[in-house]
Image (spheres, coloured by chain):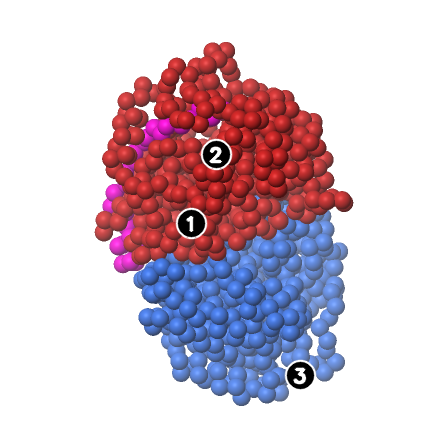
Chain colours: A red, B blue
Amino acid sequence: MTDRENALALAEVRLTPVLVADPPLLNTQGVHQPYTPRLIIEVVTERGVTGLGETYGDAGYLELAKPLAGSLIGRSVTDLNGLPALAAEVCGDAAAATGPDAVDVGGLRGVRTADKLRLSVLSGFEVACLDAWGKAVGLPVHALLGGKVRDTVEYSAYLFYRWAAHPDGRGERDDWGAALDPAGVVAQARRFADTYGFTSFKLKGGVFEPAQEVAAIKALAEAFPGRPLRLDPNGAWSVATALAVAEELGDVLEYLEDPVSGTARMAEVAAALGGTGPGGGPGTPPGGARLPLATNMCVTTFGEIAEAFTRDAVQIVLSDHHYWGGLRATRELAAVCAAFGVGVSMHSNTHLGISLAAMTQVAATLPGLRYACDSHYPWQTEDVLTERLAFHDGRVTVGDAPGLGVELDRDRLAVLHRRWLADDGTLRDRDDAAAMRRADPGWTAPAVPRW
Amino acid sequence: MTDRENALALAEVRLTPVLVADPPLLNTQGVHQPYTPRLIIEVVTERGVTGLGETYGDAGYLELAKPLAGSLIGRSVTDLNGLPALAAEVCGDAAAATGPDAVDVGGLRGVRTADKLRLSVLSGFEVACLDAWGKAVGLPVHALLGGKVRDTVEYSAYLFYRWAAHPDGRGERDDWGAALDPAGVVAQARRFADTYGFTSFKLKGGVFEPAQEVAAIKALAEAFPGRPLRLDPNGAWSVATALAVAEELGDVLEYLEDPVSGTARMAEVAAALGGTGPGGGPGTPPGGARLPLATNMCVTTFGEIAEAFTRDAVQIVLSDHHYWGGLRATRELAAVCAAFGVGVSMHSNTHLGISLAAMTQVAATLPGLRYACDSHYPWQTEDVLTERLAFHDGRVTVGDAPGLGVELDRDRLAVLHRRWLADDGTLRDRDDAAAMRRADPGWTAPAVPRW
């Protein structure tokens, strides 16, 4: 290690699990819990510079985060290429004990393997190291990633079918009210547009039978003519249903996200929609552009890319830096996508401002980003930052302050951590099906295809 | 731009074309000229930190380098993601005027397009910016790329058929003597092994009819039992010849490099050698591992990857950071290769120590690098550095000094630049066929397949 790297060596790593208020947002597996676990990571250099990271906070992730945190002491914040091997080494036993299926959020995070769990954990450390590195040398994270190519990053309004409140009066209240039909979805979209300036809209589908969701998209198209719309049933449909929906909505959708489960079925849908075959990138059938398919379910790891791209199963990959192993891995994913003519954008699960800042910093560096990114952030009324990130005209400004440009509010962190400590264990693993059973005791996460 | 980025802004860019002594090394297109053009790039920050880069020095590259150099003034050395767009903008006219075929080194650099010329030029600037950035903040280039995963990088002995001297007494003399048969090749390999400790050997083929080159590889296998051997005829063979050679040498070759020209023919050879079909990565046929194919000719740009990987045409890509657009692009290429189970290593053309340092820094950061890299450096008796890089046990140590860890010798640079100034123009574009005509006036670069 060089002198400079020694100065950037880590002296301390702090892990703080929190429970964050989450509204009763519906998806095909169930409903969001009233509180969702997240893990806040702080890395501190020898010279006292602190970097922030955030990732999933379920028990399986915490199990892996502990040994990895310990192993980082003495390493430079610049020493990132070795993190996967380090994580495999120090987390091996924990991952084996936890098992590949230990963290189950109803399949919404794609394939679950020990490798992917480790990547999800180390991504939080990678972001924290980049934040600390940037702060230590006075550069924003985007500069450490080679510099921004845009000054703002566009996000889409993430629309959900939802209840007015959680069952049994649990959780925090909000004033959004229920959205359970096309009119409710349009009203929600209108409020998002008015409040944040979003001009691109995504509806989380797979909740109601497809005709109702088709009607909701058509209502959105009428309310926001010409605006980019997306529908994401989280793989709940059959190939036939996906094609029927594509037929109905082909003219108004920007893309269709995970209409079916698995690469084979996605490839079948893509081919039927007019693909040009392997290696050709997104196909343009005679008479017009085909409706592209996006995914954050069948391509969630580098190991899943070859089959999907070779079969032309997906035309847009929605990256999630948590899954993929961090901001640098996200850039690598974008490079793979670019080489295959596949588009790239960003997926989101419930997250706080640290992750939104990280998403924004890396998104700013991707020349090939052509779609508005997803973010749950507007649904999160709580945060651990002294100042929330803001959306203007549907965009987040790419900060030029050192690191991620955000500051931890220790009081808020303590409050959310105490909530985690106080929990009896029922909320420490996100389980949308269990949350749904509060309202519907017989509920089990439906098998796919559901329709 | 942030304050820190302002401090890293460029105040000056210097371009110095040089002619570098090159031995009479033979390839299928002809012979190396007695002197080869290279371009030395210096970027200087507002605070006086100088970064070094190196790339091809042919006239077509110089034409593009001039406007790009001018456009860098005032930009931060960290602002690298925007370089391709900047180069396209400012070099557009020059590239159009130069035309895609203006720089012709006999096809040895793969497809020639304006895009690729620009990438080859900007790679030199990217390396120079990384060097300056590293020096400014006290970090080695490998740390700016996320940190090294190894402390030394292995190189192979790059064996050439060669004459004892250039025709007409031109160029610099050396004491290697001729190598024009198996015994000569083995003697050359022995000297490389004794002097530098190389334990991996690559023979540049395509010079003699295949049976003689097969004999040379067999002689090497006998002289260095169990050592990794490669043969590279630069695409000179037909599919049938390639398969016949593979049959003869399958047991002793680590890989066969560009046996045929073009992705279609490479795919045909790979399939016949036992591929498992698209998307499966390198195939392992029943009964043993197939002989992998490597390339630095049919996959030299990101645009060529999809077809080659989808068709399983190549199993190893030999990256050249000059072609691909720099060290960060090399890392992206490695990520694409990793996703498709394709191996990665490094190609080399005639280059100096700045590029060897750059190759070593980036190679150190690639977890998936499993093959010894190629380098012409041992053939270059001249350099522009105060201290030459050294091979020990066939390896170059990954420096931890700031930047690339090399220092420019301005006197040597001036000597080699004066040679370039004094040239009547005949050597300013590398032309191996023209050099061959000095010995064989009727020579034209052979059409492929030659055999």
Q: SS at mark 3?
A: loop
Left-right relation of B35 to B312: left
Q: Nearer the viewer, mark 3 or mark 1?
A: 1
Q: Position of residue A376 (x, y in %)?
A: 45, 35
Q: SS at mark 1?
A: strand
Query: Nearer the N terminus, badge 2 or badge 1?
Result: 2
Which residues are the magenta region?
A1-27
Q: Position of residue B10 (x, y in %)?
A: 40, 69
Instruction: Examine the structure image and report whether residue A25 is included in the region drawn in magenta.
Output: yes
Image quadrant where residue A407 sits: top left
Instruction: Examine the structure image and report whether residue A154 is included in the region drawn in magenta.
Output: no
Say which of B239 and A317 sits in front: A317
Say which of A119 and A378 sits in front: A378
Q: Residue at 68% x, 38% y: name it.
A: A251
Q: Position of residue B32 (x, y in %)?
A: 60, 75
Q: CA distance from mark 2 to mark 1?
A: 21 Å
Residue position for label 1: A397
Residue position for label 3: B438
| Same-chain status of marks 2 and 1 | yes
